[in-house]
Image (tube, rainbow, N blue to C red):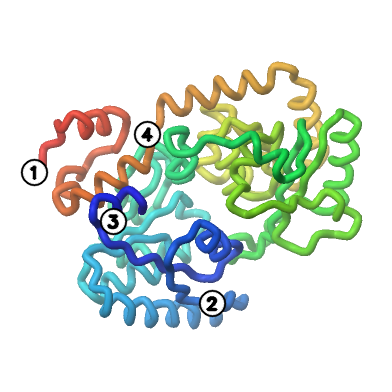
Amino acid sequence: MRRLMSDGHEIKLLIKTKDILEILVQEDGWQYENILSRKNGNGVFHHIWSLLKRDFRILRIARKFKPDILMGSDASVTQVGWLLGKPRFAVGEDDYSIVRRLHWLMLPFATTVFAPEICHLGPFERKKIAFDSYMKLTYLHPDIFQPDKKLLAAENLKSPFCLIRMVDLSAYHDNNCLGLNGEMVEQLIQFLDKSGYHVYIDTENDMPKELKEHQLKIKKTRFHHILALASLVITDSQSLSVEASVLGVPSIRFNDFAGKISVLEELEHTYQLTFGIPSKEPDRLLEKVQELILNEKRAEIFRQRKEKMLQEKINPEDFFVWFLGSFPESFHSIRGKVVNKEFMANIASDKILYE
């Protein structure tokens, strides 16, 4: 957004109340409009009613703002773009098998969808513009983000430390999926403490009293700096596992999505940057934690693995800035191609032919 605005493009940022999104945009100083200030209830009716409200509010804003392009990860963006007859681009890296309902609400209306090459979109594969990278690298690529080690002292955190992140697994696609619980976290703390590691816990739910002393209390916009400086991440969050991986921080994800998500499968089996363990195997979790903690060469091994991954993946921010800044010519020139290192090199040397 900053790069496009510096090139003279006007941007209207819309958000909905979700997790800490509004806190982040406020702390970062962005102007925005919140199109859904109250969180969704659970159940199909609540989701449909929420979507209709978002559709109406975006439609009202778009008629006034008159955008040339609509882009986002919410179904309302593509639906409103379709109603207005404007180019509408969906973005995401979830497989069709994981978020079928979202894809059927969003992708039939999309002009195209940007997704990692490894991501499987099922019946919507023909709409995909595939890029050889991960969405998380749009903000965590080393060309964009470098962790500030001074923030550890500023936030009164001690090294070495392990970061544990617990999510509530209440989204519609999380049905019947289990993850970390308080008893397991206590066992992990006991082992890590004996091994000389401090433990900081971040959770979407209320922190259990017995774990309060380990609660991570930081300014939200500093989270990725702290994440990048961790020795180990243990979580039941897919997103955090990807973020840790692209930062070169060893991560163990403990939930029933292990083995099911293409992006994480590639990060695990091609680059060995993360490890997935299903909830029915808690003993394996403790074994993997012990294996990683006792490996004295862990930091260097994961640094090398991260570098290998970065050498093979593009910086997706560069691609999005080029695509949006050069639209519609960029759209016609990209059909049938995978956006990889060679493609980006051609962009940099102006060898892309606009057809």
Residue located beneath label 4 in the image: 314
Q: Nearer the viewer, mark 3 or mark 4?
A: 4
Amino acid type for the residue under numbered disc 2: Ser
Tell me the quarter of the picture where residue 355 sits.
top left
Q: Helix, strand, or loop for circle 3? A: strand
Up-down: is 12 above or below 144? Answer: below
Amino acid type for the residue under numbered disc 4: Ile
Residue located beneath label 3 in the image: 112
Q: Are marks 3 and 1 in contact (CB under 8 Å)?
A: no
Residue located beneath label 2 in the image: 37
Q: Position of residue 181 (x, y in %)?
A: 81, 53
For marks 3 and 2, give the CA distance: 28 Å
> In percent of the image, x 65 and y 36: which residue is there?
150
Amino acid type for the residue under numbered disc 1: Glu
Which mark is on residue 355? 1
Q: Position of residue 3 (x, y in %)?
A: 32, 48
> In percent of the image, x 40 and y 43: which residue is there?
116
Q: Helix, strand, or loop for circle 2? A: loop
